[in-house]
Image: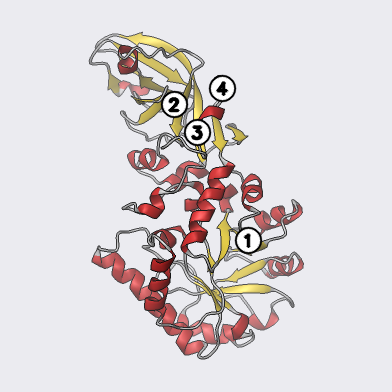
Amino acid sequence: MPNNKLSIRAKLNKSLSNASVYINRAALQHNAAVAQSIAPNAHLISVIKANAYGHGMLDTAAALSSVTHGFAVARIDEALELRDNGFQQMIIVMSPALSPEALNRCAENDLTAVIHTAQNIDIHALPKHLDYWLKIDTGMHRLGLMAEELPAMLSTSNPASTTLMTHFSSAEHNHSEHSHAESNSLQMQQFNQILRNNLKEKSPSISLSNSATLLRHNDADSYQQWQVEQLENSAFSEEYIRPGIMLYGADPLDIPNSSSKSLYPAMTLAAPVLAIRQVKIGETVGYNGNWQAERESTIATIGIGYGDGYPRHAPNGTPVMIHGKRAPLTGNVSMDTISVDITDLVDQGINVQAGDTAELWGENLSANEIAKLSETIAYELFTGISQRVDRILL
């Protein structure tokens, strides 16, 4: 990662006591600007559910409040916490489990509810002054109204002020792969057909694009062309985009492009080197001895483990950054510690000592790389950071 105005390298603590996560506010704002630049005419709704993907919901909301139109959360308690802390922006509550009581609280607190189903929802008895969106299932088959349910749901709303949303199942995949291209195209075709069948001359608001959908388009012209082609000039009054993972600097695309490469990590996870020891040929490191020294080795023990959110299944060889150099993980991850082989660093004349700082992912080591090696995704790494990890806002 280039050392530029977004870098927090000079601010990283050199003598950590515990595993710590640094949150880079400038990076959050930069990534939001990338999203907005792709859809400059759309309203930016920053997705900050699940404690802002582990980055801290209130801190992230504060960092983005000047550049975002609103926020999206999964649960009403998250939305109410934002309101209680003074955030006045539009807040979308995306939970499908909104009881009549919860819908009343949404209306009372100026929250926008998302209606996913006609089941257990009396569209004629929704609270007065409730702002709500209708989510349509266009092919993901997880949540959302089916096309045949929509007319009844629209019967009591003003179509001109309705917001229709959907969610793509395969937006992150390379669209030269026929199956994924067809899946997304079919979803757009169904959404377009719903617009034409149900709203005719009306112009509703729409919300289609998550991080991957935005990033597949390198610029505003490409994004607009995609909309025109896919929606066949169906009219809509306003658009709301819903970037999530890209705000935090992780690329969701399976093949990066210039837009996704411009993202900057907002989270850097670091931990102290606790001890240095020598290991002889044939000796093992860690539980169950699944790593064995093939040479005289120098091993550094680092103060982070699965109790902090470092992935339990990270394999031998997973990189850790120490003094700007990669060192491979050795042995099973413990609850509180990991071990890395720093023999090559020592051989290069690099002096690694107890008290030095190791980077587990972030500015200099992609979370996506660590996630892939651990057979998971960056979303899980971010949201898995435990409460005992110190959080430092920069």
* First in sequence: mark 2 vs mark 4: 4
Foreground residue among 88 and 316: 88
The image position of residue 15, as x and y in percent, is 56, 19
Q: Is residue 156 left or right of residue 165?
A: right
* First in sequence: mark 4 vs mark 3: 4
Label 1: which secondary element: strand
Q: What residue is drawn where x is 52% and y is 42%?
A: 266
Q: What residue is drawn where x is 59% and y is 79%?
A: 162
> Which kind of residue does numbered mark 3 sit on?
Leu
> Which kind of residue does numbered mark 2 sit on?
Ser
Q: Which residue was labeled with disc 3?
A: 269
Q: Which residue was labeled with disc 2?
A: 334
Foreground residue among 268 and 1: 1
Label 4: which secondary element: loop
10 Å crowding of disc 2: few (<14), some (14-19), many (20+): some
The image position of residue 35, as x and y in percent, is 49, 58
Label 2: which secondary element: loop
10 Å crowding of disc 3: few (<14), some (14-19), many (20+): many
Determine the image quadrant of residue 153: bottom right
Q: What residue is drawn where x is 60% and y is 84%?
A: 160
Q: Which residue was labeled with disc 4?
A: 16
Q: What residue is drawn where x is 46% and y is 47%?
A: 379
Task: Indicate the quadrant containing the N terminus: top left, top right, bottom left or bottom right.
Answer: top left
* First in sequence: mark 2 vs mark 1: 1
Q: Which residue was labeled with disc 1?
A: 70
Circles 4 and 1: CB atoms closer than 8 Å = no
- How far is the residue under mark 3 from the one under mark 2? 17 Å
- How far is the residue under mark 2 from the one under mark 4? 19 Å
Q: Is residue 229 above or below residue 305?
A: below
Q: Can I make out residue 252 in this image?
A: no
